[in-house]
Amino acid sequence: YKALENYRAAMAIARSLPPTDATDAANIAQRRELSDMHYKIAGVLDQQGELDNAMVSYQASLVIKQDLAQAHTENATLQRELSELQNKIGDVHAAKDNPAKALESCRASHAIAENLTEGDSDNIEHRRNLSLSHRKIGNALVMQNDPAKAMESYKASMTIAEVLVQAYPD
């Protein structure tokens, strides 16, 4: 519970900072920090089994992160963070037994991961995230009773993972 208290205190501080110009680097950093605090709070709530509250925090993080990612499409880090956030939201939907919403979030994550990989095919992290997104789509498809499509996603995930393991054995 201490972590949750600390994250909430940090978020209160981030919210209290005076606003700056929306294009100002300090503003971008403040908004990113606020999104990260929502994300961390959601993670703690998720671990505690408070899925509804976790979803509220993940969604708050998503609103900020989407805005930043749309304003800075060239920023691969923001795009990757948005993809990872969509995956987390998909995980919560899956835990709440909502496979349609889980699949929607996983596909949103996948689209970003695909774009990042296409833009930088040598980036190991992008390729790993793409493999992960295939796997999570497969998980959601299993929940929807679609084993054939799930198998396609799992095979795509495994193909990427095998290439990465061979190229980077350590």
Image (cartoon, rainbow, N blue to C red):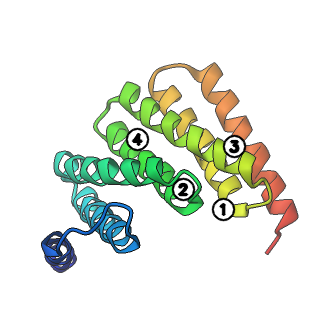
Which label number is shown at residue 90? 4
Residue 93's spot in the image, x, y percent? Answer: 33, 38
The crowd level at tag 2 (other Cα within 10 Å; few <14, some 14-19, many 20+) is many
In space, the residues marked 1 and 3 are separated at their CA atoms by 14 Å
In space, the residues marked 2 and 1 are separated at their CA atoms by 9 Å
Residue 95's spot in the image, x, y percent? Answer: 33, 41
> Is residue 139 visible to the viewer in this orientation of the structure?
no
Q: The disc labelled 4 sits on which kind of residue?
A: Gly
Identity of the residue drawn at 27% across and 47% down = 59
Q: The disc labelled 2 sits on which kind of residue?
A: Arg
On the image, numbered disc 2 is attached to which residue? 80
In space, the residues marked 4 and 1 are separated at their CA atoms by 20 Å
Which label number is shown at residue 157? 3
Badge 4 marks a residue whose secondary structure is: helix
- Earlier in the chain: of badge 2 and badge 1, it is 2
Residue 168 lies in quadrant? bottom right
Q: The disc labelled 1 sits on which kind of residue?
A: Glu
Tell me: residue 9, above or below residue 24: below
In space, the residues marked 4 and 2 are separated at their CA atoms by 15 Å
Badge 2 marks a residue whose secondary structure is: helix
